[in-house]
Image: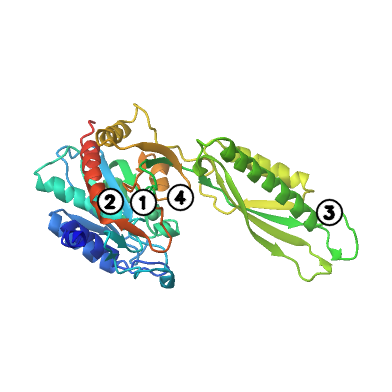
Amino acid sequence: MAAKNWETNEEIEYFREYLRIPTVHPNPDYEPCVEFLKRQAEDLDLPVKVYYPLDKKNPVVVLSWEGTEREWPSILLNSHMDVVPVFPENWTHPPFGADIDEEGRIFARGSQDMKCVGVQYLAAIRSLKAKGLRFKRTIHISFVPDEELGGRKGMMPFVSSEEFKALNIGFSLDEGIASPTSEFPVFYAERTLKGVIFRISGSAGHGLLLMPNTAGEKLSYITSKMMELRASQQKRLKDNPELQIGDVTTINLTIVNGGVQSNVVPPLLTVVFEVRLSLDHKVSDFKVYLENLCEEAGGDIEFEFTSNRRSEHTAPTVTDESNPFWVAFKSATDELGLKTKLQVFPGGTDSRYIREIGIPALGFSPINNTPVLLHDHDEFLHAERYLKGVEIYKKIIENLANVEN
Ligand SMILES: [Zn+2]
């Protein structure tokens, strides 16, 4: 009975239609998505532009709703069109079927991450426009490719394009993560990815000797020290229940390479650690730590960062009275009676490219009381939760777009 109501809801229909477009890695075809969004633009009576900051296979679609103060910096509502791969045999519903069950749960890859958010922005604007409202600041709703692979074909080239500059963006909203409790996390920063590869040289020879300065001994020293650092961060997390994973540095040994055969001591071993530095862990300090580590281990060791884009942290988005967009966002969620919690995003999103060029950005998905299923099997979002999210965005968008200049 109830399911029938959801199935005839126009916004739920649009959401399901968008979910059925399989923009899935490794080879997503975005054209059907572009067509869907063009139809949305037509329905909303909004101008739409398609940009290709890298190549023809990777479109960026931008719908725009002009404000009354055209010169004022605009609001960007961003989402990514791509989704991560699926293992259909582990799903109880087809991953691109957007089935809705008795309870009202809509199953599809992208239902949480993050096709929901993209069409919720559009649903909110459809409703606001239907009321005859118009706001001060122009609102741009962008749909980008390639976020799940790091944004190198999407947001990264887009932010450095002339077309992006012309949008004159003053504030950006992007994805957060679902929350299993009633609380909504709001992300104001991201950790800094600093994977490190050590190339460890040492004396080589026959495996029956006890030569000094072998690569194996040095590898052992480096690994033990990196694991000590890891343990110290585990302890920080354990000792302070207030801390989230995004508040500490994470370290994991991910690749070890080298060797020829068991009785030959190799001249070279390499080891890779995946490292994400917390905001209070300075990149320059970490670099000095690694330099000293190489010396202590016996020298003849080179190290290199696997992700070398930034020499220091990207500044977090300011979340106090001095940032009027934060004030506007917070007053919207307060007015709606939502419990929010500021957090550092544990992974990486397209917001980092926005913050890097000095534009404030918040990560927020209006999904609470829902199991966190991004990148997981049977990803779903409840229809009711989806529609509530649209209501939440209506208030947030109105507040942001009316921030005084
Ligand atoms: Zn995402």
In the depicted view, which residue is nearer to us: 224 or 33? 224
- Going from N to C along the chain, the mark reached first, 2 or 4, is 4
| Front disc: 2 or 4 | 2
Q: Secondary structure at mark 2?
A: helix
Dots 1, 2 in contact, CB < 8 A: yes
Q: CA distance from mark 3 to mark 4?
A: 39 Å
Q: CA distance from mark 1 to mark 3?
A: 54 Å
| Front disc: 3 or 4 | 4
State how many labels appear. 4
Q: CA distance from mark 1 to mark 2?
A: 9 Å
- Going from N to C along the chain, the mark reached first, 2 or 3, is 3
Q: Which residue corresponds to mark 4?
A: 348
Q: Which residue corresponds to mark 1?
A: 370
Q: Which of the labelled discs sits on residue 395, or is there none?
A: none
Q: CA distance from mark 2 to mark 4?
A: 25 Å
Q: Quadrant of residue 3?
A: bottom left
Quadrant (top left/top right/bottom left/bottom right) for the C terminus: top left
Q: CA distance from mark 2 to mark 3?
A: 61 Å
Q: Secondary structure at mark 4?
A: loop
| Front disc: 1 or 3 | 1
